[in-house]
Amino acid sequence: MADFDFDAVVVGAGAVGLACGYALSRRGLVAAVLEAGPIIGEGVSARNSEVIHGGLYYPTGSLKARLCVQGRRALYAFLDAHKVAYDRCGKLVVATNAEEVGRLDGILEQAQTNDVEGMARLTKAQALALEPQLNCEAALISPESGVFDSHGYMLALQGEIEAAGGAVVTSTPFEGATPLDGGGYSIRAGGAEPTALTARLLVTAPGLSAQAVAGEIEGFPKASIPPLHYGKGVYFRLSGKAPFARLIYPPPIPGALGTHYRRDLGGQAVFGPDLHYVDELDYSVDPALGDEFYAYIRKFWPSLPDGALAPDYAGIRPKLHGPGEPQPDFRIDGPEAHGLTGLVTLFGIESPGLTSSLAIGEEVAGRLGL
């Protein structure tokens, strides 16, 4: 590393950026992870369901299918090794009417193609034996699904990077990069003390800022930067006892997995997210959306009491597709895509990005020839 300040710089200290830094650290590289915000993981990584996805739905051969399953297996092992809390509670995908029953067959077939362990079809009686308050005609069970402490996970990743001699630097926005003659990058970072640093390798994983960051890399082909769409999802929290032990999901909706139920690690029930496309980063939760939530949730939990839901929080997903468009795969672009040696750019890392994060880090390392 004699000629560079760091072996690698990663832009974005959410779960995926930190996992990329961790993967590089595991290969003996000294990595700096730059975060624009004042703390790690306060963007997309802080405003999601904290669900560990099994990998059921994603198209055969897609990055999402492969990296979700690989990432989930690695994630449970990492959480065990670092004593980060999780609950491998399992998930039920429920058909609440006869029309949805047929869709379960396709989901089960896709899950088995994706090598998801333990998947099984449940009759109505079998599902109700597990979750007596459930309304369904049939269900699938995914025993490998769960929930976890995502911030504890990110702190553990930060600890690993720093233990390997690297650094995670907050309040340090990326402002641009210039390729150097002979390889590597000169990187400009802002904040209270603007600085310039050099690195042999550069990885961009800043979530909602991915397109803007790529646009500030000299020589990056603008035509290869995909469009960005803000997919907002809100959550409502239940007052009172959580009705189900397992995750409860309806069949997916276009562009998302649909409003689902989870019992968080504190034992409280949370419902969401829905999906609305927005033009700005607005994290408010409109209480009027509660009416839609009551109607939707009562399809699988008819005894939801009136007045039991309270607006909780919202997240915004960095989608590469707009309303009515097919949902694309993750974009992990190496030199073969943009022509710049030693650079990997990530776009559209939404669900199941959190579950996939360790595998995404390994994929990025591989794209860098490591």
Image (cartoon, rainbow, N blue to C red):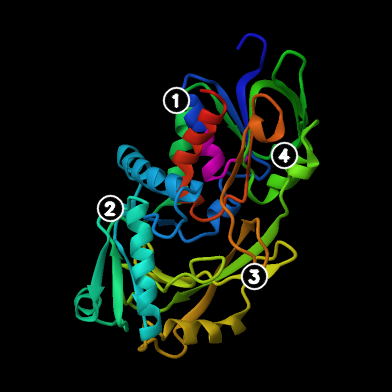
Displayed quadrant of residue 79: top left
- Mark 2–mark 1 distance (CA, rounded to whole Å): 28 Å
- Mark 3–mark 4 distance (CA, rounded to whole Å): 34 Å
Extent of the magenta region? 12-20
Q: Which one is in front in this view, the residue at disc 4 or the one at disc 2?
A: 2
Is any atom of residue 37 visible in this view? yes
Are circles 3 and 2 on residues that touch, CB within 8 Å? no
Q: Residues within 10 Å of mark 3 (few under 14, many from 20)?
A: few
Q: Which mark is residue 43?
A: none
Q: Which one is in front in this view, the residue at disc 2 or the one at disc 1?
A: 2
- Mark 4–mark 1 distance (CA, rounded to whole Å): 25 Å
- Residue at the extreme bottom: 306
For the residue labelled by badge 4, is the local secondary structure a helix, a strand or a loop? loop
Instruction: Return the residue at label 2.
Output: 117
Q: Earlier in the sequence, mark 3 or mark 4?
A: 4
Instruction: Return the residue at label 1.
Output: 26
- Mark 3–mark 2 distance (CA, rounded to whole Å): 32 Å
What's the amino acid at mark 2? Glu
278 drawn magenta: no
Q: Earlier in the sequence, mark 1 or mark 3?
A: 1
Instruction: Return the residue at label 4.
Output: 173
Q: Which one is in front in this view, the residue at disc 4 or the one at disc 1?
A: 1
At x 35% / y 58%, what residue is drawn? 111
Left or right: 208 as drawn, with respect to 139 = right
Q: Residues within 10 Å of mark 4 (few under 14, many from 20)?
A: many
Instruction: Return the residue at label 3.
Output: 324
- Mark 4–mark 2 distance (CA, rounded to whole Å): 41 Å
Displayed quadrant of residue 47: bottom right
